[in-house]
Image (cartoon, grey):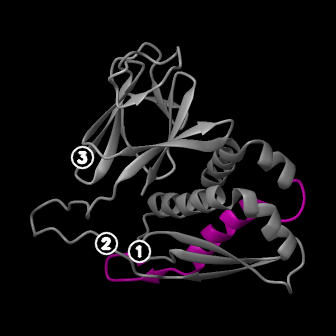
Amino acid sequence: MGILNEFERNLERVIEGVFTKAFRTGLQPVELANRILREMEAGKTVGVREVWVPNRFVFKLSAPDREKFREAEAALRRELEKVVRDGVQERGWDLVGPPQVDFDTDASLKQGEYECEASLVEGPMPEPAPEGHASKPGPSRDGELILIERGKPGKAFPLTKDRVIIGRLGESDIVLSDPGVSRRHAEVRREDGSFVVADLGSTNGTMVNEATIGERTLEEGDRITVGKTVLEFRRR
């Protein structure tokens, strides 16, 4: 239930007013998240050392529900893919490729009805490390921070440098006029194919997904809060 509760909180925070108005009737997003977890459980493939579970999910929706979801579809897809990652981490399963969630319209379905096709789809995975050495992440992709304004994505800040400073100083890489942001508030740095956010001794602290952090590795969709400003991390 923890994964589903977090899914609902994250989705509501991402799309705010759209969530409360559009999702009062018909198919509810949490039903899709719950279905993903059930399909992962039902579709387990037991290997010698691993338990593989589906990583691609295609939801067929009725025309009214698809139209209702359309404005928030990108955010819904990201949060459902996070459900896959969280489910794998919580249960000790493995994936053969990155999570993929897609939507399609089926005119034969009535509002509130849906179908789900779950499958294992191989994708780029990190190369195995030599015996006796710790595994290393695969090739990195660039990242970006998206300014979230009134619940909607706004300006994008590409993370093209190995170290990106967030603050009020004009020489910062990401300059924010928010009075709650310190002159040099936080940094995002690239480490072994991942991106790490770290607080730089700011007055008001740095939060990731509403939890105060000193330093933390970022995952797709994580939200960094500095002062009253929210920046969402995304891979490109």
Provide the residue span drawn in magenta. Answer: 24-51
Identify which residue is drawn at 87% across, 70% down. 64
Identify which residue is drawn at 58% across, 42% down. 154
Disc 3 secondary structure class: strand
Q: Which residue is mark 1?
A: 97
- Quadrant of the image occupied by residue 153: top right
The span from disc 2 to disc 1 (Cα, nearest Å) is 7 Å
Identify which residue is drawn at 81% across, 67% down. 67
Residue 186 lies left or right of residue 136; in this view the side is right
Q: Which residue is mark 2?
A: 125
Q: Residue 169: x, y in percent? A: 37, 18
Q: Sequence order check: which comes first, mark 2 or mark 1?
A: 1
Residue 134 lies left or right of residue 153; in this view the side is left
**Viewer-nearest residue: 112 or 65:** 65
Q: Residue 36: x, y in percent? A: 62, 70
Disc 2 + disc 1, Cβ < 8 Å: yes
Q: Residue 5: x, y in percent? A: 67, 49
Q: Nearer the viewer, mark 3 or mark 1?
A: 3
Disc 1 secondary structure class: loop
Identify which residue is drawn at 40% across, 81% down. 122
* Residue density around tag 1, few if under 14, some if 14–19, many if 20 or more, within 10 Å: some
